[in-house]
Amino acid sequence: MDFDKITTEFRRLALLAGHQIMQIYQADDFEVETKSDNSPVTKADQAADKVISDGLRQQFPDIPLVTEEQAASHNVDANTFIIVDPLDGTKEFIKRRGDFTVNIALVQDGIPTRGVVYAPARGRLFYTVSENITVEEIGPHDLMQVGELKTLSVSTPDNAALMVVASKSHRDADTDQYISRYNVKDMTSAGSSLKFCLIATGEADLYPRLGPTMEWDTAAGHAVLTGAGGHVVRFDDHQPLEYGKEGFKNPFFIAYAPGVKLWSE
């Protein structure tokens, strides 16, 4: 498999999709529809999905594609596949809070091995350049010319003063109760897959998710965090979170920097 091509194309398509998203985001108004699962969708989701899926099918016709916005793609049954959330954090997008991302990841044998997370409104771009190296590309983000790259590494956590990141739109009492078991120095709220990236950069140590997510929500951020030395495990048994599950549904999970002493029942 040509991993250099995968890195190049994932980056390029994420930037193209981000441009499409920002054109709609910066408009005076945009229409919000409701999908069959009662989640919101906008023209930005649909435009970004078309750019990414068309590009991936052209460049990687032999790799199955799973994308949130195309229900027919959810029937993929393969060990290797590409999985996409063209606009992760639609609620943040609708509220114009900026914490939304473009997520593209390659999954191999249940593991996200390559991924890109682009937050166009924040001007932040994270991606894997190998299975064990993640970078943040410093803007401006040119479509053809790669900018300055900063290699990322998770922090060395202080269990007496942890930095915790949690969801903006999906925070609940169970999550707060779980976090209360730790010695927390500071709490940050962030939307979408940016939470994984904040651990990858060392800006946070721990991200627990006690709520429903889909694999397209997490795969790219998971890959980014793994490349920076972090881990993502199931909440119930602390075993590695795997991909290609039935219906692409995730269990509750915890993302963290090594050294965090995870609380368990």
Image: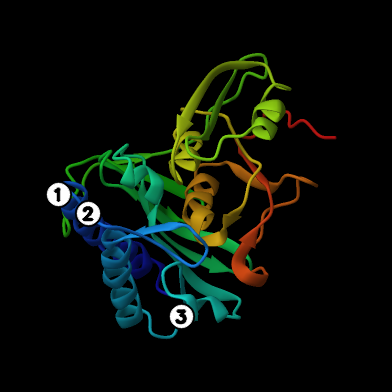
Residue at image point 44% right, 45% down: 192
Neighbourhood count class around disc 1 (C-alpha, 10 Å): few under 14, some 14–19, many 20 upward: few
Q: Which residue is disc 2 drawn over? A: 30
At label 1, which amino acid type do we have?
Answer: Ala
Q: CA distance from mark 1 to mark 3?
A: 35 Å
Residue at image point 37% right, 43% down: 92
Toward which corner of the image does residue 256 lie, by quadrant? top right
Q: CA distance from mark 1 to mark 2?
A: 7 Å
| In front: label 3 or label 2 | 2
Q: Position of residue 61 (x, y in %)?
A: 38, 85
Neighbourhood count class around disc 2 (C-alpha, 10 Å): few under 14, some 14–19, many 20 upward: few
Q: Which residue is disc 3 drawn over? A: 63
| In front: label 1 or label 3 | 1
Q: Which residue is disc 1 drawn over? A: 27
* Quadrant (top left, top right, bottom left, bottom right) of the N terminus: bottom left
Q: Classify 37 as above or below 222.
A: below
Residue at image point 48% right, 25% down: 188
At label 3, which amino acid type do we have?
Answer: Ile
